[in-house]
Amino acid sequence: MARLLIVDDDRVFRETLVETVESLGHEAVQAEDGQQALKLVAQNRFAAVFLDHRMPGMDGLQTLTALRAQVLRLPPVIVLTAYASSSNTIEAMRLGAFDHLTKPIKRQELAEVLVRALRSDTSAGTSNAPPASATEPDNQDELVGPSETMREVHKRIGMAAASSAPALVWGETGSGKEMVARALHRHSARAQGPFVAINCAAIPQELLESELFGHVRGAFTGATLDRPGCFRAADGGVLLLDEIGDMGLGVQAKILRVLQEQEVTPVGASRSIKVDVRVVAATHRDLVQAVQEGSFREDLLYRLNVLTVRLPALRERLADIIPLAELFLRRAAARQDAAAPKRLSADAAQALLRHPWPGNVRELRNLMERCQVLLRHGLIEAKDLGLEDGSSSAAVRGEPALAADWLAGTLPEAVERLERLMIVQALAQSQGNRAEAARSLGIHRQLLYRKVAQYGLG
Ligand SMILES: Nc1ncnc2c1ncn2[C@@H]1O[C@H](COP(=O)(O)OP(=O)(O)OP(=O)(O)O)[C@@H](O)[C@H]1O
């Protein structure tokens, strides 16, 4: 039998929880607010604490911070909330919560978390509370996703945010890796420092080194000025090395050195410069396989693999699809100045749930934006999406309806229309794989990246 503390301002919920805990053979002590919890924890030893997130006065996270400051060996704290968001989950985990659960809590769920908490030897870490993060994220940055898998991602971000070790975010194209890296930055002690992102696949390898480490004037033809490079631009903050799996072996060796020594040598310089950067690497490639194939350094993988966040593909988190679709419709409507967001009919929602989303959240965002802007009616039907047979309506594909529309305007405008359409189709055929799309279009991948950005398809 273990002695547990239950902190919640809602008497009915508290007493129900006490009953369940007692029926599982444990003893429960109650507190109705954070202050009372602090007193009880100072005077008693508890095996675990259940802490409500939303309470008047000191809320759950403030209570958790105060508990950590007050108690040297804090028992596992399980934060409970009726309103889970990515930011409150990440914050709770960052502050050292053992777990973060959503109300109502089933008996089975409670029994499981208790077994894990009582078995854990963490005593919730040390008395050194990590510094509070600078700001609450604004809505644009909110990692939306009520699915259980996404909630696990929020928890991992929270745990990884408390450290300064390199982190590796793995997920398919468009699944939200950059958003995760931004969340790691925003919720960390480096939130006040810069966040710099570089896409290693979009830059020719011969230029990548100077982009990353900078160069001195005269280092090579065209280097007319000193350039600091991304590592120095990210000093005191976070550097996202996106698509690190596409980085050449030569640059990989140099990245490894920076991670080991925390210093960079600009191209053409004789001396190195100290930097304080947390590196977050992201990739859609299987780096273990890349190591086996000899295209990725094993020692770099070990170095980056300290904290890994695996971001599941959108088709693996069905519960996120409709909330994300509605979010993107609302955002697109807000950009249209007060236009009402379009609504999804039941069959459109079904079609969204059935689609495999090879381009993940980005593909969903693009489709919803096009629906919001291009459809003339307020209710989106499945046929407007054209996901089942790949034949979305011309309006949603962004194609002019009539030949006259294709030929309208100047020659450069008409060429742009055609170029955009060919890129959209190549990306759809390659299921979002840009290297393959570039090949089928007969252009360099870097040019495709530029065009994708130019036409807002990224
Ligand atoms: N959970 C989420 N909540 C809200 N928006 C999201 C979420 N995940 C992704 N997005 C949106 O989807 C788009 C793609 O996300 P992001 O750029 O982070 O993906 P990525 O995995 O880094 O892509 P790439 O593989 O091309 O580098 C962005 O517009 C981002 O705002």
Image (cartoon, rainbow, N blue to C red):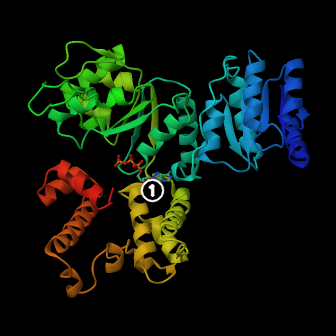
Q: Give the camera-side residue of 8 and 87.
A: 87
Residue 419, compared with residue 193, is above or below; it is below
Q: Residue 114 location, x and y as percent? A: 74, 32
Residue pictured at 34% horizontal, 26% vertical: 232
Residue 79, compared with residue 262, is above or below; it is below
Residue 5 visible here:
yes
Q: Is mark 1 within 8 Å of ligand 1?
A: no
Q: Give the camera-side residue of 81 and 56.
A: 56
Name the element at disc 1: helix
Q: Residue furthest front?
A: 225
Q: Give the camera-side residue of 175 and 128.
A: 128
Q: Residue 185 location, x and y as percent? A: 49, 35
Q: Residue 277 location, x and y as percent? A: 41, 24
Residue pictured at 24% horizontal, 44% vertical: 202
Q: Which residue is mark 1?
A: 315
Q: Residue 104 location, x and y as percent? A: 76, 50
Left or right: 295 with respect to 324?
A: left
Left or right: 393 with respect to 185?
A: left
Q: Quadrant of residue 90?
A: top right
Residue 346, compared with residue 140, is above or below; it is below
Left or right: 29 with respect to 214?
A: right
Q: Quadrant of residue 414?
A: bottom left
Residue 455, compared with residue 89, is above or below; it is below
Q: Residues within 10 Å of mark 1 (few under 14, many from 20)?
A: some
Instruction: Pick the quarter of the image with the N terminus.
Output: top right
Q: Which amino acid lies under the numbered mark 1 shown in the image of this protein?
A: Arg
